[in-house]
Image (cartoon, grey):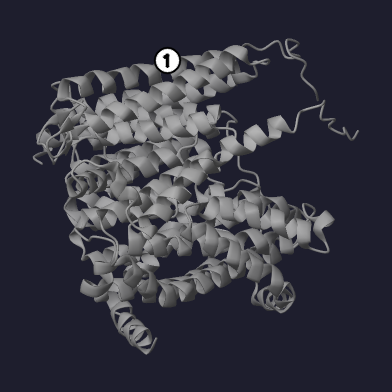
Amino acid sequence: MIENLANLIGGFAIALTAQNLLLMMIGILLGVLIGVLPGLGGANGVAILLPLTFTMSPTSAIIMLSCIYWGALFGGAITSVLFNIPGEPWSVATTFDGYPMAQQGKAAEALTAAFTSSFVGALAATIMITFLAPVVAGFALRFGPPEFFAVQLLTFCSFVGMNRGKVAKAIVAMMLGFGLASVGLDTVSGQLRMTFGSTELLRGFDFLIAVIGLFGIGEILVSMEEGLAFKGVKARISPVVVLKTWALLPRYWFTSLRAILIGCWMGVTPGGATPASFMSYGVARRISKNGDKFGTGQIEGVVAPETAAHAAGTAALLPMLTLGIPGSPTAAVLLGGLLIWGLQPGPLLFVEQKEFIWGLIASIYLGNIVGLLIVLTTVPWWAAILRIPFSIIAPVIIVVCAIGAYSVHNALFDVVLMMAFGVIGYVFRKLGYPLAPMVLALVLGDMAEAAFRQSMLMSQGSLGIFFSNPLVGSIVALALVLLFWPLIGALRERMRGAPAAPVATKG
Amino acid sequence: MDEQGGAQPEGEREIGTRAVELATALVVLAFSALLIVDSVRLGFGWAADGPEPGFYPFYVGLFMAAAALVIVGQQLVAATDPPFVKASELRRVLAMLVPSLVYVGAIYVLGLYVASALFLLAFMMWQGRYSLLKSLPVALGIPVATFLLFDVWFQVPLPKGPLEAFLGF
């Protein structure tokens, strides 16, 4: 415990250098911009900027990239409240009560509540990380290839199991990710897989290109259907309003606490900020005294999802750093970054790269404080940016995405691939194929296969190694349960019979 | 505002979801066939020291095909066929997609900077209906800013074409 605090102070020393502070501010500003613009999402934005960090030290790089993430978590709320357009998937729930509040002239209160709740959620999750991460990392020291594969299997199964009613599509998406991940050179045997003689495919498919295409281009294409026109509410946040809202917020401490728990849970077990925000909103609506007024502009309806979303987004770093399991799509991209920089997530990271870990954790505290201040003071600018007509913003975003895709491997073919992924993203989104399993499989696919093969080497080809000790066995069992959960649930519903379930139609 | 299946008040053409679902599932099946075929070439059983290189993609392809067939089945028994996209929506999407594809192609020939400038110019003038005078600042400003940012500051060279060669870069 004391040792952790000492490490943390050391981390602050690293985070508080001029260069890192500058990168922090740049990251947050970029993050808010990304959070505000459609088509540039958190995962996507981090993916585009990742190659630019190759010239920096890994510590500085991850500080900037994670600050982009925090900025996006803050920024998504701005468009939700002012324009009823969620800038990020995890801000959708914020529109439910945030926009009505804005329409009633309480935009500044709504935004202050959203930003402050985000900050509280992030702070809580960061404290959790500070104390839990070393514990989990220590625990993970006992992990060998079978245990790592089991944890990854657990992740995959839970991603499939989360998609009740869309299991077949989730499986397709995930398998597609695995399939794409296996294209290229197989490092174990030295054989080429699925390249069909093409030199371009030798490199395989990079998850960064997929993310930029699926989440970036795909999102823009979907948005184009409506022919976007931003008409929003004006807002200016004065210090008086901030203080008044802050005086109001402690009333909802219980909601916040619940949201923090939900957020941390959804961040650590793979889920992410988006499911966390919805769950928190739903639970708050059911439990709160004002529950039936949710949707008309209740400040509690803004506090609940924002706290949970930001807590989840931050908490997602915990399994990523300690076990190499990303708890959210953006964490998956950050994990990919770690791998590119040559850092192996897991227990050794905490032992060998103390500077990196604690510098990062300290920067999360700082980044959120700075982020809160920046975002409270700059709301009118972001609102102004959105008034730039879409016919200017859209092609600019496409140019940015193209540059991002190119800079990953200096390969123009990747830009073509990005467009292909964009079309896939558009079709998949509309058909209801979940994208998260595909990204997850692309990032973890090679690692999972390697862990599987190493385990097989250890066991001389016997699958029994996955049940050889209670730790592995229980994780694998849990994974299988999560995988078949939706099937069990669907079967039970059908067995209870569907004697014309009457849906009460209200006017 | 209700929509009975079949009666479309605007009389607008639509593409049904079922057709797109089936097409997508077929593409997925084709991809899984590719995976399986190549896995057979690589060998998908157990070698002396564990799975052969084709083992993993083989089963991935298998699961993918199975899931895709489930989707095909679901679609064939589906009772309704909600619209996937309306003609007007598709037009707007294509209005973004087609120029973007042309843009990417143009990068190969003209280099990123020139292609971007033309893309921005064309898009703003055509979609945004801005005059040439108003579009030029953005269309030229962004590539120049990008050049300074990437080629000069970050030292990340972006694809160049005949114009840059002519100017001596």
Q: Is residue B160 left or right of residue A221?
A: left
The chain letter for the residue carrying disc 1 is: B
Q: Is residue B143 left or right of residue A246?
A: left
B44 versus A457 height, above or below: above
Specify the amino acid type for callout 1: Leu
At x 42%, y 64%, the residue is A28
Quadrant occupied by the N terminus of chain A: bottom left
Q: Which residue is mark 1?
A: B26
Residue at 61%, 43% (x, y): give it: A230
From the viewer's side, name the closer residue of A390 and A145.
A145
Q: Residue at x 53, y 66 (%)?
A: A375
Nearer to the camera, A431 or B123: A431
**Residue at image point 27% right, 40% down:** A206
- The answer to whether residue A32 shows anywhere in this view is yes
Residue A218 position, x and y percent, is 45, 34
Q: Residues within 10 Å of mark 1 (few under 14, many from 20)?
A: some
Image coords of residue B117 (percent x, y): 31, 35
- Which one is in front, A204 or B73? B73
Which of the 4 quarters of the picture holds residue A140? Answer: bottom left
A487 is higher (above) or lower (below) than A250: above
Mark 1 lies on a secondary structure that is: helix
Image position of A75 (left or right of A46): right
**Residue B138 point in image, percent of width and height:** 39, 42
Residue A208 visible? The answer is no
